Image (spheres, rainbow, N blue to C red):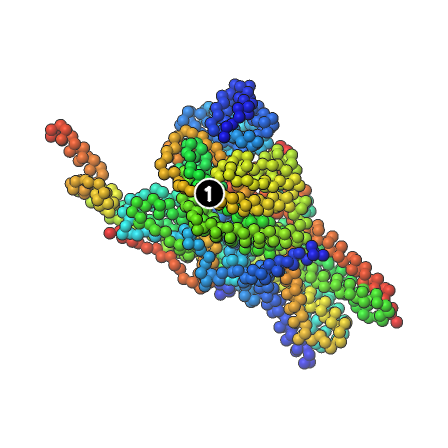
Amino acid sequence: MSRFLKKSLWVFHLNTGSCNACDIEILDVLTPFHDAERFGVKLVTSPRHADVILLTGPITLEALPKVVNAIEAAPRPRVVIALGSCGVGGGIWHDTYSTIGGIKGLQKILEEKGVKVDAFYYVPGCPIRPEAILYAVAMFKGLVSKKVKSEIKHAE
Amino acid sequence: MLRNTSIIDKYVKLAESSNASLTVDGDTIHIVAKPEYIPGLAGKLFNEFKCVHRTCVATDERPLNGFFSLTHLFTDDSNGFYIALKTYLEGDKPRAPSIVDQVPAADWCEMEARDLVGIEFEGRSTYRLVLPPGWPSDVYPLRKDFQYDKRPSMLPVSEKITITEESSTVPVGPYHPALHEPEYFELYVEGEKVVDVKYRGFHVHRGIEKLGESRMTYQQVNFLAERICGICGFEHSTCYALAVEKAAKLDVPERAQFIRSIVLEVERLHSHLLWLGVAFHLVGYDAGFMHMWRIREKVMYLSEYLTGSRKTYGINLVGGVRKDINEEKKPKILETLDTLEKEFKELVSIAISVPQVKRRLTGTGILPREDAVKLGVEGPVARASGIDRDARRDLPYAAYKHVSFKVPVYTEGDNMARALVRVDEVFESISMIKQLLDQIPKGPIRLEEFDIPPGKIGIQVVEAPRGGDIHFVITGEGKPYRWRVRAPTYNNIPALKVMLRDQPLADAPLTIASIDPCFSCTDRVVVVKEDGSVLKLNLTGGVKL
Amino acid sequence: MSEKLKPAKLLVIATKSGRVTKKYPYEEPLVSPDFRGLIEIDENKCIGCGACVNACPPNALQMISDKETTVLRYFIGRCIFCWRCVDVCPVGAITGTRKFELATDDASDLYVHVVHKKPKCETCEGQGGTQKMLYYVVEKSPVTEEYLNECPDCRKKSFIESVAKRRTGGVSE
Amino acid sequence: MFDTILVGIVSGAMLVLPLLLDGLERKVKAGIQTRIGPPVTQTLYDFLKLMGKEVKPFTGSALATYMALLTILLQVSSLIALNYFIIAERNFQILFAGLALFLVAQASSAMTPLLVPNPFSQIGGYREVVISLVNEFTMILSIGAISLILGGKVASPYAYIGLLSAMITLFITSYVSTGRPPFDIAEAEVELASGIFVEFSGPLLAAYVYGMLTRRLLAKMIPLVIILQFLTDPGLITPLILVPLIVVIWLVYGIAATIVGRTRIDMAPISLLKLYIPLMVLSITGLLIGVYHA
């Protein structure tokens, strides 16, 4: 990834059928209290300009073809951040008939179609706090380290 | 509240005229008639009795009584009645008469019934309204024999939308900066004047109603209802809880109703401030957007302080609430509301004075009063076009009977009127929260022991920031047998065709946003291609104006 | 003229409120004390009863059992932080925290496994529930020792046999 | 010989100026919106990052690249011509050559979006053409009026009124040609999904954005040079005075841009002409009455 991608992150918001709580928090990140622009984050309106794709929602079947087109339209190097419990794990409707249950299903489809994505990030939350997005951006820029670790506990 | 019988006699005479049975249960009148009488009855209810057609519900009641049932829900706002006009249809391929000629607003809910439950409607143009492309045509998800997590084998992965040549087409969506939701409006323009609007595909159909009937229990459906829409989620979960409590006749402690009303009004504050900020952003006035959302951040902190989460509050359960508003929280709430009111008044007066904002909002996206009545639009869109209707006052629920408030009504029906309605409603909500906080009684906040008898019907309308959304619940064993949700944006979208016609293109995103569309509310239905050819819903065809 | 210059009043508001940005992550974020964040499962208290699995709307908490062990798997990615599990846990093993910084670049970080051993059943080698739940039940309800190490089916069979024996004077079918 | 080297150095330094000034403007805008805002070098980082990105080809992308590079070439040469006029020799052919190069660069940058097959880009391009039609002619008219008034002998006070209105028009046209709100309707980010930029990506986008920012620099530099040259003692304008003045004007324009919204294509020409026609009438009458040529 080019060194300057860490300094200037152009973000494209891809709503694949989300309930809007995460989308409003994405807008909230740009507003004065959280101000993502101080990290060089700018919300852009066309996938052509995007470096980071903020994917919210459980990817409904109707939105699937357009999601794949949008990700394909972003120039390389491109990063996809799955936001919220719908994006990361499919949320409450992870197994209904009209969604493919979050980013895992999309990763398989992207591989089949040969659409290469340089990095995937996951930010759980329902909805994700604006600070959680800032934490993911800070992690991508290398300012903070990961706080979540997979644990295996044995009950005695 | 004693219902005076003169009103009920009017309905009784109506029912006898077409030998239908009528039962009154609380504030709900159930009329069961034969299918052939339905159009006549619906026409009388809509035109003579001036009832509002809210939606229609198709249910697969074969496990119960071997029939399909189709229920049209009306509300008589002036007298505070719910009217459920029900009819039974037998056979696996049920046929029902359409009421679109009498009630144009019933167009989309009939098409949803056709696709999800498979009821054929005679006497109208039918098109596929639900289900994503590539869905087999004879599989109906809301039938009881359909397994809720069976996905179609072939996933449509990419499709090119052919842009027709007659007049140049401007695709607005599915990923357009003005709509932060995947919606697809194809605007046919001559120069920069919008000639025709084609609306295709709500992409947020997540199969919520099927999920509510299969995997979820009564208490879990609350959390599902809250996530129908990320902006007015609490309205949906309150509406669901009230509908189930009405069906099971539970008397919820008064303090819980007060807490529900307070959080409902906090959510209205955050939703209206959000919309005003986005409207300023769409007109290019970004400083207004930033300042409006700076003010809104206090409301988000307030809702987190009251309920534990910024947006999906999660304090609503059937039978009450989970989290109490104790005494030492009151000063903080009142102080936040005062600073909010002062700053909001100041900012709105400045923003309205900006020449571009004033010129671009007034006179654009006009919805005349007759179209508004005919299409049955909801909430601020209706109140801006001169219809004085507000479910909080007409069909009081939760603790709204203890509160006095003014319903703002404007008559111009343009974007500025819709903005001013929302501005006035913010001030009303602030005064309402203060009144509720003064009168909140002591006592428990939740019913501990209760049981929900199966087979009961509960209908409830709650006034969301965008309009009245209605929940219809038939109770079942441990989980709802049928749960139907209709959100306000559902009726406001057809009104967009009237508003967008002959408008400059630059205002299209502003007008689309002016109905404050919440597609995730509306999106339990999907408009879809019919075997390849993109169906053209031209202005006259789709909705009879 | 003052109407024309009114938009400039925005500068007055801006200077009055100054820059309100919270320099997160270097400054403490604006989180209220009641915020519902990540939950933590205390493996010593957890008895693997599955009450939380039934109450969890998005199936983030799931029970996976194989030959010897039953694993309570908590997938943080799908959790909606409603804390219903905190309400329904009979032994109070699940506590809520205010953590929300859960970003990660590797999906396997989002899984927490609580492994429970299954009780061995002499007669039919089948297993039901978890060891700790068995001890918990025994503490709470007076059941004689002999039924202790049998799986629910054999326990039912042997219980019916003992009742039949007592009633019919020892005739076993 | 020494002058040409100086011109080269000053022009080279001025090439980086638009990026830094745009960063400064974003910082001031953030201040008005009560937030911290990006570092001043943010636009520079954006530019360098875009250089490292892949270009997504579209039909006509080769021609669009050529047009974008042509625009930058014209603007740089206009910059060099202006610098040469200031530093080396004050001969008016070079000044008006610089002005002509700037106007041609404006035309070529207005043409580029029309080549892109995307409907948003087309509409953005048409809007750009409409605005620059109204705006460029008024700029030329006002420059002509100023030079004619100052060229001849001043007979009566009307000349000064004419001069004043011509100068005001010049500044307003320079504001409008920088494409800032309320006249950023070509790039109307929310309505047309960033209209003219929508299909460009990577280095091509960097080139086109750089062309836009250099146009903002030139649009401020030209009025300053003309007014300082005619009004004050010719020796006054040196780069040391010019650059701070440009920075001040850039910030004033930036603040003005944040407190207004965006106009609409059918309102913009009308409101502009309502402004320009009286001012131009005033300046031309001032020219005819107040000045006579020997």
Q: Relative to residue A145, is residue D291 drawn left or right? A: right
In the rendering, at what x and y percent does residue B71 appear?
50, 28
Question: The residue marked by circle 1 belongs to what chain?
Answer: B
- The residue shown at (86%, 64%) is D288
Image: A115 above or below B101: below
Of residue D75 and residue C161, the one placed in the foreground of this image is: C161
Q: Residue at x 75, y 72 (%)?
A: D229
Are there few (<14), some (14-19), or many (20+) residues within 10 Å of tag 1? some
Question: Would residue B185 appear left or right of D235 to someone viewing this image?
Answer: left
Q: Secondary structure at mark 1?
A: loop
Q: Number of numbered discs present?
A: 1
Is A110 displayed left or right of D41 in the figure?
A: left
Residue B315: x, y in percent?
A: 42, 44
Q: Quadrant of the C terminus of chain B?
A: top right
Which of the 4 quarters of the picture holds residue B542? Answer: top right
Is residue C105 or residue B512 the one in the foreground? Answer: B512
The quarter holding residue D201 reads bottom right
Q: Residue at x 67, y 66 (%)?
A: D249
In the rendered image, the residue lying farthest to the right is D294
Any part of residue D165 in sight: yes
Amino acid of disc 1: Ile
Q: Residue at x 59, y 29 (%)?
A: B50
Give the camera-side residue of D238 and B174.
D238
Q: Is residue B488 above or below residue D278?
A: above
* Residue at the spot of label 1: B440
